[in-house]
Image: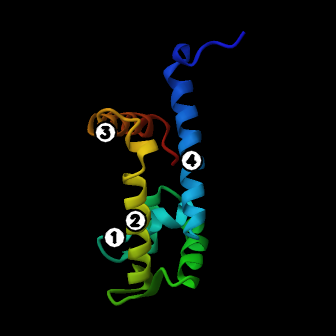
């Protein structure tokens, strides 16, 4: 006999919620023609250009991993790359107006989604708890 959802451990509940949220995000992002990695890259560039390594750090992936995602965004006109005028060895990545508009559209849609927003009684407290959990886990299990 299967245990009731209310009896599941917090870890199992978090894994299930995470998987369901990931499916919802992937569907939304697919509708807008961008991958999860692409969306996070656009988010990393909201406040201005970053070197490719800075984008990778923001996304918590390796430089090699981020390179292909940036190339795809560049092909779709969502970001541009140019040589850093202060260090010719670095490439600066910049979000385009089209990329900024896409990021805004996706963010607004998620933040107004009643299935997500309506399910959380105190979004700020939930956010604070998630940040605390992530910080704790990153400290112990961070990829080096």
**Residue 88 image position (x, y, % from top left):** 41, 88
Q: Single out the mark in the foreground, 1 or 4.
A: 4
**Residue 50 image position (x, y, % from top left):** 37, 74
Instruction: Pick whichever, 66 or 15, lies toward us.
Output: 15
The residue lying furthest to the top in this view is 1
Residue at 33 percent of width and 40 percent of height: 127
Circles 2 and 1: CB atoms closer than 8 Å: yes
* Residue that carries the numbered disc 3 in the rendered image: 123
Question: Real-space Cα distance between discs 2 and 1?
Answer: 5 Å
Q: In this rendering, is residue 107 above or below 96?
A: above
**Residue 101 image position (x, y, % from top left):** 39, 75
Residue at 37 percent of width and 60 percent of height: 108
Q: Earlier in the sequence, mark 3 or mark 2?
A: 2
Q: Earlier in the sequence, mark 1 or mark 4?
A: 4
Q: Earlier in the sequence, mark 2 or mark 4?
A: 4
Residue at 52 percent of width and 67 percent of height: 38
Instruction: Pick whichever, 67 or 22, lies toward us.
Output: 22
Question: Real-space Cα distance between discs 3 and 1?
Answer: 23 Å
Question: Real-space Cα distance between discs 1 and 4?
Answer: 22 Å
* Residue that carries the numbered disc 1 in the rendered image: 46
* Residue that carries the numbered disc 4 in the rendered image: 22
Instruction: Pick whichever, 142 or 46, lies toward us.
Output: 46
Please rate how many residues cluster around mark 4, counting C-alpha atoms within 10 Å: few if below 14, some from 14 to 19, many from 20.
few
Please rate how many residues cluster around mark 3, counting C-alpha atoms within 10 Å: few if below 14, some from 14 to 19, many from 20.
few
Q: Secondary structure at mark 4?
A: helix
Identify the mark at residue 43; answer none if there is no mark. Answer: 2
Image mark count: 4
Instruction: Pick whichever, 83 or 115, lies toward us.
Output: 115
Q: Earlier in the sequence, mark 3 or mark 1?
A: 1
């Amino acid at each position: 006999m299967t245990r009731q959802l209310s009896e599941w451990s917090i870890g199992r509940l978090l894994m299930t919620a995470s998987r369901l949220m990931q499916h919802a995000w992937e569907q939304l992002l697919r509708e807008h023609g961008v991958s999860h990695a692409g969306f996070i890259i656009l988010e990393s560039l909201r406040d201005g250009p970053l070197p490719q390594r800075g984008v990778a750090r923001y996304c918590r992936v390796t430089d090699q991993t981020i390179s292909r995602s940036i190339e795809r965004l560049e092909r779709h006109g969502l970001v541009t790359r140019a040589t850093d005028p202060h260090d010719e060895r670095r490439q600066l990545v910049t979000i385009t107006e089209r990329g900024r508009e896409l990021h805004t559209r996706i963010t607004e849609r998620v933040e107004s989604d009643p299935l997500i927003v309506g399910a959380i009684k105190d979004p700020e407290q939930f956010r604070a708890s998630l940040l605390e959990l992530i910080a704790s886990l990153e400290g112990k299990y961070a990829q080096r």
